[in-house]
Amino acid sequence: MPGISDILSSLEREHRLRHIPLITETEILDLSSNDYLSLGSRCEEFREEFLDRFSDAPFSSSASRLLSLKQKYHNAFEEYLESLYGKPALHFNSGYHANVGCIGALTIPSTLFVCDKLIHASIVDGLRIAGSTFKRFPHNDTAKLQKIVEKESSRFENIVIVVESIYSMDGDIAPLRELVSLKKLYPNIILYVDEAHAFGVCGPRGLGISEQLGLIDDIDIIIGTLGKAAASAGAFAVCSSEIKSLLINCARPFIFSTALPPANVAWSMLMIEKIVGMQDARIRLADLSKEFSDRLEAISGKPTGSSTQIIPYLTGNAENALAIAAKMRENGIIALPIRRPTVPPGGERIRFSLGADMNIEQLLPVFEILNGMNL
Ligand SMILES: Cc1ncc(COP(=O)(O)O)c(C=O)c1O
């Protein structure tokens, strides 16, 4: 049995030992953050409005949602989301809690989960913790998914198809229209879409790819997270009132964890109010992302595969990813190397994520560094 030091040495040998970054300078270009609308860097602008409107919001919930007496802002948040999506919503403490909780609650007898190969670790953990029966299909391969559904749909009462709308490491988009068509062929399909990286960024009000494609009513569970474009913390599930009731009763992270402070939930609500009106920022971000991706393709000679603000630069191995990240760092740019287990072997990369308030001139050093490194 390997001991703790063996595990750490082997991570070090494989260039996979992680450290919490210690960054003190302010003059840096951060291409690692998920602050896609650049709202996080503008928080000061909204401080006064927040204090005016929400000065009574407590800084602790002091109990879980099922026990807390301080629910006013959680309820208002959920009502506001319901007014946007036209469907009930339930607040969670984080996207991690939301996925673990929702997957666990949906793990009822005779349920098969069929998940995209690249789904987020929080969904995988949800499946493992709940002991769910699950299969995975190759990334974005609807033909293979359909084959699994054809074979399994008569053997299970429910088939839950789980995808992300924008994939967190690849920046590509799930074929949601095709998935909705598939769902219409099989009455026992539940469609589950994690919009963590699309909430705020896509759709005319920023509600995600589901809104952009007019598919909100066709998706059974939409997960949105609040720590990325929404410049806050927490998450939510949008679903039918029946599923909401199941989640309230069976999602263990919802039941057994102290609810986020009402002050934080009020802040999330304020940020979403801003997001709804930020279509100009969404368009700016999409244009910048396209230009950035085109320039990376010209350097590498390979498609990035991304059509969003998350743009990978594949490095072939962890060593190259670390070397590029270090060179960027020397030049005041934070671009984190992504290695196993976040991506499979060979998928090591630099993951660039852009923000709406950046511009291409600021990003020129990135291309100069990559051109100069010849890796
Ligand atoms: C697709 C996806 N879902 C869920 C999460 C978890 O969200 P949170 O950071 O709110 O726990 C992440 C976060 O990084 C994510 O990328």
Image (cartoon, rainbow, N blue to C red):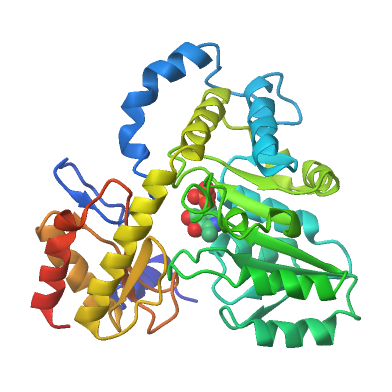
Q: In this picture, is 40 found above or below 137?
A: above
Image quarter of the C terminus: bottom left
Left-right relation of 8 to 71: left
Q: In this picture, is 79 found above or below 313?
A: above
Please name the residue shown 75% across and 26% down the image. 67
Looking at this view, is 333 or 110 the one in front?
A: 333
Looking at this view, is 60 or 219 the one in front?
A: 219
Left-right relation of 257 to 318: right
Looking at this view, is 364 or 286 the one in front?
A: 286
Can I make out residue 192 in this image? yes
Q: In this picture, is 270 found above or below 247?
A: above
Report x, y in % for residue 98: 64, 49
Please name the residue shown 63% across and 44% down the image. 236
Q: How many marks?
A: 0
Can I make out residue 112 in this image? no
Report x, y in % for residue 280: 39, 45
Please name the residue shown 55% across and 11% down the image. 56
Residue 214 in which image quadrant = bottom right
Please name the residue shown 72% across and 42% down the image. 86
Report x, y in % for residue 9: 32, 72
